[in-house]
Amino acid sequence: MSDFSSSIDAGTDRGAYRVAPDPNDPVILQLDGMLARVLDISANGFSCISEHVKPHMRYRVKLDLPTEPGVITAYVDINLISEDGLARCQFVGLKEEDQEQLHRYVLHRQKAAINAIKSTKSF
């Protein structure tokens, strides 16, 4: 995904609009106490590279969204790990206020993507 790419999840069990974090202002993720890089995120889950997690297991996560105050502490189920180590994670029992923070972050990234597209078009 590019800096401003986004898509609707298909086949990842998330069923939500996902966006790539800004590489200059990343989402800080601790997955089972270890830092991992978030490649895309939605209100229902995220993808990351993590070598120490196993599929079909539940892990504790801490997410620090750059546009939101505080840290989200939650649990995720690892639905799938691809051959190249991409872990597809789905939030479990997320608090309503944490889900709202995720919605706001995704919306913020969508607006940034739209503005980037508008600024590159010449009329």
Image: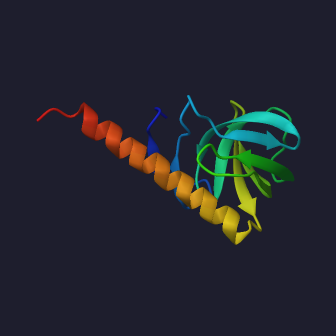
Place residue 76 in its image quadrant.
Answer: bottom right
**Residue depicted at 80% across the width and 34% down the height:** 35
Number of dots carrying numbers: 0
- Is the C terminus in the top left, top right, bottom left or bottom right quadrant? top left
Question: Is residue 74 left or right of 16 when viewed as pictured?
Answer: right
Measured as percent of width and height from the top left, residue 42 is found at 58, 54
**Residue depicted at 87% across the width and 44% down the height:** 32
Question: Is residue 85 left or right of 115 when viewed as pictured?
Answer: right
Measured as percent of width and height from the top left, residue 101 is found at 62, 59
Q: Residue furthest bottom?
A: 96
Measured as percent of width and height from the top left, residue 50 is found at 77, 34
Q: Is residue 25 above or below residue 90?
A: above
**Residue depicted at 61% across the width and 53% down the height:** 12
Q: Residue furthest front?
A: 69
Question: Is residue 47 left or right of 104 when viewed as pictured?
Answer: right
Measured as percent of width and height from the top left, residue 121 is found at 21, 34
Question: In this orientation, does residue 14 appear?
Answer: no
Question: In this orientation, does residue 69 appear?
Answer: yes
Place residue 120 in its image quadrant.
Answer: top left
Given residues 60 and 64, the one toward you in this image is: 64
Q: Is residue 48 above or below residue 79?
A: above
Q: Residue furthest right?
A: 33
Image coloring type: rainbow
